[in-house]
């Protein structure tokens, strides 16, 4: 969320740990002490959940969507899938299956390799420089210079001081330095069949292998004779009698075994499958037949080769499987897909709301409700995600969608939105179809959704991102001012006291409400204005550590920059750090409370949380300890109560340190509008580990 945190706000990091069973750890960073509320991580994932399943040729799911990844079924074999980070294989019945076996014989270089006179050139497989597995009874082998010498072969033909014009090759190849090595072919006994003379080769497919000589590709037969002249910039394996070749023009075409082109001039191609080949021109795909003539018009954004009589195609957000007559055989809300093998094809789909709800119910971490100032749970824990009350309303997620509830827990604005943020100055930000807009309390949309990230309104302005462009808007949704020739980067703060803190490169500046710069070249650690004073950092003139002090609304320094860090003013006092200890200064720069604390918050509700000897407590504006430092964590007082932690449980204390409601909680927020957010875990085995740290 942009523009909602003071620079010295605190981040609480919550790690959920499953005590029983496999450890399941999720870390939630909740900035600003629940300022943004608590969101279900499971819900975020599930809302846009997309899973792979397998359909049959009627379009029905034979294996229901449940996988994060899925591959095609192998010919007669299993399909690789990934579910919740676990990779395994399944059969067409959807049950786990053994991984396909690797033919080790094919993956091993024949050895020893002997020349035509029986001389040993490569004694063991480990001595082979590189090889390609046996294909059609021949294996391609790269021979080093010393091995070539044993064969009595000198590098006369293939060695060249020039590289191929296009070295982006279709299969794994090495382009050697001149004379470094050459490729030839051996049989399964290791006998040399085709002498090494090529810069690189492919394996034999359909009786021919692609070879590189003199910077161009051609094809040889199994006797080593040149079947198709070396004249192409790239060449791929034959499939159904034709091979894809790249011409001098940089476009692709197809050549037959007689060396004649049947088609050319395409941006990209795919091999022939079932009598058709996919071709791309002007950014779109279609299919040609074995005569090189159009079979299916060029019109698709993406296609897969035909398999089992069907091809997966996509155009925009529409996807379907077509047959060779271009008939749409299987339509569906597919986001992606694969090819049919053994009668099944993988497809990616977004879950239905019913499926999402079922999944969310099984995976949600907690229920959220609200406590009142008497300690009563006036709004029972029921929400998936929720934010603090603001201006009498709270943004809550019920099921998959967000709306706004009143103090009785009733939805005043129905839960129909993808997300929602707290109200500020009469407007609440809501997300519709991936974009944010602003509505009023009646639910009427006042600023149409167009933003990628919304900020809260303050002093009549809100920082927003529209795509990657950042700027401030007024309540009408109009750009409030132009900041020179620059956009305002992500991370700009809300206006306080008439000024907003914004990033400028790796520094910060304060902008007025017309875009005028009040102070600039400020260091990270600078805070927004509070009580008309800003805690700021200045670069050290000698290149040392930045020094921190305070400025007024005119941008003038009122307290000299002499500290290691500073905190925003509250109750007339600002926190200062020097030599590892914190204290407080007044508006005149006088040290009002000595430097003696390990960490401090800012004053709020007449008290300030301080840390000493590893424990938190509270002091008043005279520095007197009003609540002894005995807590493992403590947040600032809000509406006369402060949330504190002892061990792994939280409770509320009043200004004299009493456990006001005589109850503790798994997790709780601060009071706002008389209500505090309460987190109730779904599983009794779940606990929370809280780590607080200062935000730079």
Image (cartoon, grey):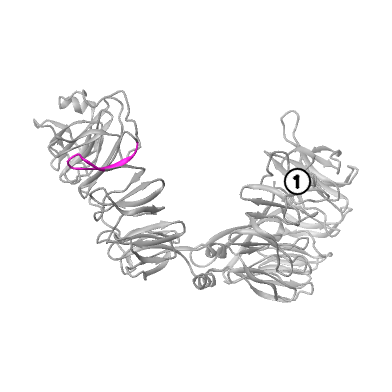
Q: Going by the image, does 429 lie left or right of 500?
A: left
Q: Is residue 472 visible?
A: yes
Per the image, the residue denoted by label 1 is: 481
Q: Which corner quadrant holds the N terminus? A: bottom right
Quadrant in the rendering for residue 263? top left
What is the secondary structure assignment of the residue under circle 1? loop
Indicate whether residue 59 is drawn in magenta: no
Q: Is residue 577 visible?
A: no
Is the residue 374 above or below the residue 641 in the image? below
Residue 280 placement (x, y as % from top left)? 36, 47
Q: Nearer the viewer, residue 399 or 293?
A: 293
Q: Going by the image, does 22 lie left or right of 458?
A: left
Numbered marks: total? 1
Considering every residue shown, the one lying at the far left of the view is 117
Residue 471 placement (x, y as % from top left)? 70, 48
Residue 357 placement (x, y as % from top left)? 53, 72
Q: Nearer the viewer, residue 123 or 465?
A: 465
Task: Give the residue displayed 28% in from the left and 57% down from the top.
Answer: 100
Quadrant in the rendering for residue 112? top left
Residue 26 placement (x, y as % from top left)? 56, 60
Q: Which residues are magenta?
A: 250-262
Task: Give the residue displayed 67% in from the left and 38% down from the top.
Answer: 505
Q: Nearer the viewer, residue 174 or 11?
A: 174
Q: Nearer the viewer, residue 384 or 525?
A: 384
Mark 1 neighbour class, 10 Å CA radius: few under 14, some 14 to 19, many 20 or more = some
Indicate whether residue 261 is drawn in magenta: yes
Q: Going by the image, does 133 lie left or right of 476?
A: left
Is the residue 520 above or below the residue 106 in the image? above
């Amino acid at each position: 969320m942009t523009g909602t945190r003071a620079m010295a706000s605190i981040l609480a990091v919550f790690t959920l740990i499953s005590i029983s069973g496999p450890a399941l750890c999720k870390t939630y960073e909740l900035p600003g002490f629940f300022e943004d509320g608590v969101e279900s991580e499971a819900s975020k994932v599930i809302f846009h959940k997309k899973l792979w399943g397998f359909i049959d040729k009627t379009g029905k799911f034979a294996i229901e969507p449940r996988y994060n990844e899925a591959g095609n079924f192998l010919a007669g074999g299993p399909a690789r899938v990934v579910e919740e980070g676990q990779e395994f294989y399944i059969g067409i019945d959807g049950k786990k299956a053994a991984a396909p076996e690797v033919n080790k014989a094919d993956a091993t270089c024949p050895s020893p390799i002997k020349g035509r006179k029986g001389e040993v050139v490569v004694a063991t497989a480990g001595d082979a420089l590189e090889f390609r597995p046996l294909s059609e009874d021949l294996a391609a082998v790269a021979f080093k210079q010393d091995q070539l010498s044993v064969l009595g072969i000198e590098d006369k033909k293939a060695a060249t001081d020039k590289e191929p014009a296009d070295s982006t090759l279709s299969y794994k190849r090495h382009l050697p330095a001149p004379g470094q090595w050459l490729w030839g072919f051996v049989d399964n006994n290791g006998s040399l069949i085709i002498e090494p003379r090529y810069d690189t080769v492919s394996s034999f497919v359909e009786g021919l292998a692609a070879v590189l000589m003199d910077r161009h590709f051609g094809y040889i037969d199994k006797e080593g004779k040149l079947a198709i002249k070396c004249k192409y910039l790239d060449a791929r394996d034959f499939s159904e009698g034709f091979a894809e070749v790249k011409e001098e023009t940089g476009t692709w075409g197809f050549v037959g075994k007689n060396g004649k082109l049947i088609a050319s001039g395409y941006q990209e191609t795919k091999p022939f499958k079932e009598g058709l080949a996919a071709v791309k021109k002007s950014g779109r795909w279609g299919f040609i037949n074995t005569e090189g003539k159009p079979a299916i018009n060029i019109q698709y954004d993406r296609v897969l080769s035909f398999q089992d009589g069907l091809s997966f195609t996509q155009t925009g957000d529409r996807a379907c499987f077509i047959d060779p007559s271009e008939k749409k055989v299987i339509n569906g809300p597919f986001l992606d897909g694969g090819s049919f093998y053994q009668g099944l094809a993988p497809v990616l789909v977004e879950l239905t709301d019913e499926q999402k709800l079922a999944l969310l119910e099984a995976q949600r971490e907690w229920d959220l409700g609200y406590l009142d100032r008497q300690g009563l749970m006036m709004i029972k824990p029921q929400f998936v995600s929720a934010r603090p009350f603001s201006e009498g309303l709270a943004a809550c997620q019920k099921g998959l969608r967000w709306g706004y509830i009143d103090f009785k827990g009733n939805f005043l604005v129905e839960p129909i939105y993808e997300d929602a943020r707290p109200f500020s100055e009469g407007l609440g930000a809501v997300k519709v179809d991936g974009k944010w807009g602003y509505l009023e309390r009646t639910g009427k949309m006042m600023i149409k959704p167009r933003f990628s990230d919304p900020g809260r309104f303050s002093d009549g302005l809100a920082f927003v991102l529209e795509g990657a462009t950042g700027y401030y808007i007024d309540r009408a949704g109009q750009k409030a001012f132009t900041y020179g020739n620059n956009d305002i980067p992500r991370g700009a703060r809300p206006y306080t006291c008439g000024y907003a803190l914004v990033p400028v490169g790796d520094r910060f500046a304060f902008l007025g409400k017309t875009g005028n710069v009040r102070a600039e070249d400020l260091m990270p650690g600078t805070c927004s204005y509070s009580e008309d004073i800003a805690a700021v950092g200045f670069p050290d003139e000698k290149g040392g550590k930045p020094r921190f002090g305070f400025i007024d609304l005119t941008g003038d320094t009122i307290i000299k920059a002499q500290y290691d860090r500073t905190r925003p003013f509250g109750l007339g006092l600002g926190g200062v750090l020097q030599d590892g200890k914190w204290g407080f200064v007044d508006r005149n720069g006088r040290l009002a409370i000595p430097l003696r604390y390990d960490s401090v918050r800012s004053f709020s509700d007449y008290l300030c949380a301080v840390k000493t000897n590893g424990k938190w407590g509270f002091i008043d504006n005279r520095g007197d300890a009003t609540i002894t430092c005995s807590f493992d964590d403590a947040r600032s007082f809000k509406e006369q109560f402060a949330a504190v932690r002892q061990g792994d449980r939280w409770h509320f204390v009043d200004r004299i340190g009493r456990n006001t409601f005589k109850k503790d909680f798994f997790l709780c927020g601060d009071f706002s509008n008389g209500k505090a957010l309460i987190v109730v875990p779904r599983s009794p085995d779940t606990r929370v580990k809280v780590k607080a740290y200062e935000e730079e």
